[in-house]
Amino acid sequence: MIIVIDGINQHKFKDVLDEMFKLRARVFGDRLGWEVNIEDGRERDQFDDLNPAHVVSISDEGDVVGCMRLLQTTGPHMLADVFNSILDGEPPIRSSQVWEATRFCVDTKKLGRGRGKNSVSYVTSEVMIGSFEYAMEAGVKDAVAVIDPVMNRVLQRSGNAPYDYVGTAKPMGKVVAMAALMDCSEERISSIRNYAGIDHDVFLSDEQARNLFDKIETAQMSPANRDHKPLTELETYFVEQMAAAKTEPERQAVLNLIEALSDKFTPEQKTALLQTPRAFAHEA
């Protein structure tokens, strides 16, 4: 599912953005070997400081598995200021109705092959749908993207082929870069949806995204997980129930259930779970 993080709501999702920057470092730095700025395991550049819109895919497990950055072309952007040699001396695109799409990536280690929901293909299409629908809602007519020939082929076979190109392809370090134009239109979105078999609304509300991402953070915070062993389904259930409890009677009901099922846990697990609710109760 997709959450769009921009200058308005980014204060709510600093941890999601942090995971996104880590994903970008793993993909662009480690896997692709691009010459990008990586500090403390996070890939960021000067364009991330301009309040772009980040289209982020979050899995059902609460992991960041894909992203793309959308930036207005009326100010600084990569095609104008980094990849301008592609333009062959022509002036860069400057229009309020054209956005630049960059830093697209997906987590190939957490996603599988094929066309299923947890596949690279599905998340790629989901990010594209979210990006084009968000841009259309903002009145954007076209997107320009700096891509390589491999990504160009991916777009062509996934119902998302560019309708034109700007300038000419140029060697950029280890890759060849080209600037592709794609219209933000109902026809393009429909084509991507048909390819991926996605007919539902891909967007999460801020609240839904926050709750989904918090699921994994809650499990990682639990004293029951301090030894870094995977939580059992029952442990995860109790951690989530306690996190969702709003009143003292609700918290007590979870405690009572833990006691009733005490034979299902080792003494260490039981102690940790009983400490976890008290920590939540103290913070509430």
Image (cartoon, helix red, strand yellow):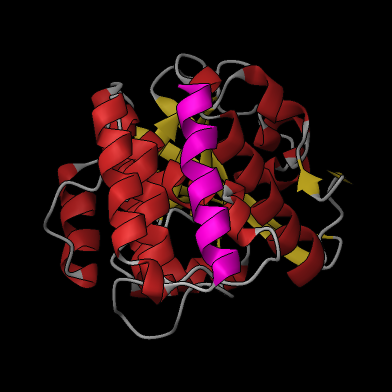
Q: Is residue 16 magenta?
A: no
Q: Is residue 279 magenta?
A: yes
Magenta span of residues:
267-284
Residue displayed at 13% across by 53% down: 200
Query: In the image, 148: left or right of 3?
Result: right
Residue 33, picture quadrant: bottom right
Residue 31 on image: x %, y %: 75, 71
Residue 163 on image: x %, y %: 36, 54
Query: In the image, 212: left or right of 279?
Result: left
Residue 28's place in the image compared with 2, above or below, is below
Residue 206, picture quadrant: top left
Residue 196's place in the image compared with 217, above or below, is below
Residue displayed at 72% across by 43% down: 88
**Magenta segment main secondary structure:** helix
* Residue 60 appears in the picture as rendered: no
Query: In the image, 182: left or right of 150?
Result: left
Residue 114 on image: x %, y %: 36, 85
Of residues 44 and 183, the one nearer the viewer is 44
